[in-house]
Image: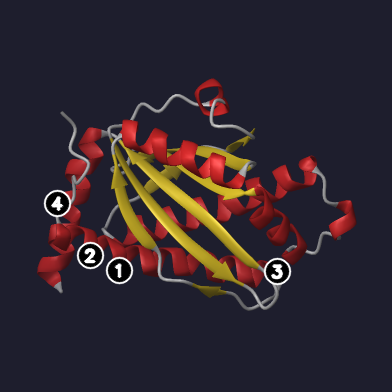
Amino acid sequence: MVEEDFLDSDQKDCLQELMNISYGSATAAIADIIGKFAKLSIPRIRTFTSETFKDYIKNKIEEYHICYLTNQLIDGKLSGENLFLIDDKSLKNLAIEFGISEVDIDEDELKDVVLEITNIISSTTSSKLAELIDTDILFSPPHVNVLDSAQCLEDHYEIEYNHIIIISTLIEFEEQNINSELAIMLKDESIVYMREALDKVMEEY
């Protein structure tokens, strides 16, 4: 049986600190690109199995009605896949921050924005995390699906990972707020490496 709490409390606290730094780097990159100040809420870290994660995502889709879900393969010591989930309202807010007129926003524009933001958040966050635990990481190009019902999840995506880490946060701009979730889904051997790396960080500090 796969344990949902595959990180102990100290490891989770350590990861929380590292993700705060890593996600902060991604937020700074977004703010730099659009030329606007952005403030990041403290990321919330939760761990899931594949089954509990499916239920979590389904609940999110039911809550938001329309979600954009992008996936990006990762490779290296941290091997698996990143998922980035953002609801329709937050993505439209983000498109406005990127300078797209509200009247011009359509699904193609939103897909372009979510792919760009996934490249920034997924790649920057994961790269910074890898740097902090002394390893490297590689990425594939991201792909996006639009989900408007919980039933769509099974059609678009089959989750194969036993260990999933969710990072939830709010990015605040002067006029818009962006709710988003980054899921890092790791292969079993990568979880072993993650635990050892977190223990090493705690020993050093």
| Amino acid type of the residue tagged 2 in the rendering | Asp
Q: Secondary structure at mark 3?
A: helix
Q: CA distance from mark 2 to mark 4?
A: 14 Å
Residue 128 at x, y = what percent? 40, 61
Tell me the number on the disc at residue 13: 2
Dot 2 and dot 1 residues touching (CB under 8 Å) = yes
Give the class, few, some or many, for how many residues have Cα within 10 Å of label 4's Cα (few <14, many ≥20).
some
Amino acid at the residue labelled 3: Ile
Kindly indicate the quadrant of the structure image that contains residue 15. Answer: bottom left
Please identify the quadrant where the C terminus is shown. bottom left
Check disc 2 and report its element: helix, strand or loop.
helix
**On the picture, is 49 further left or further right than 119?**
left
Q: Check if mark 1's residue and mark 4's residue have beta carbons within 8 Å.
A: no
Q: For the point 74% across and 62% down, which residue is it?
A: 98
Residue that label 4 marks: 196
Identity of the amino acid at label 1? Glu
Q: Label 1: which residue?
A: 17
Give the mark nearer the N terminus: 3 vs 2.
2
What is the distance, in whole Å, between disc 4 and disc 3 at their CAs? 37 Å
> Who is closer to the viewer here, 113 or 137?
113
Mark 3 or mark 4, which is nearer the start of the sequence? 3
In the rendered structure, the answer to whether residue 155 lies left or right of residue 17 reads right
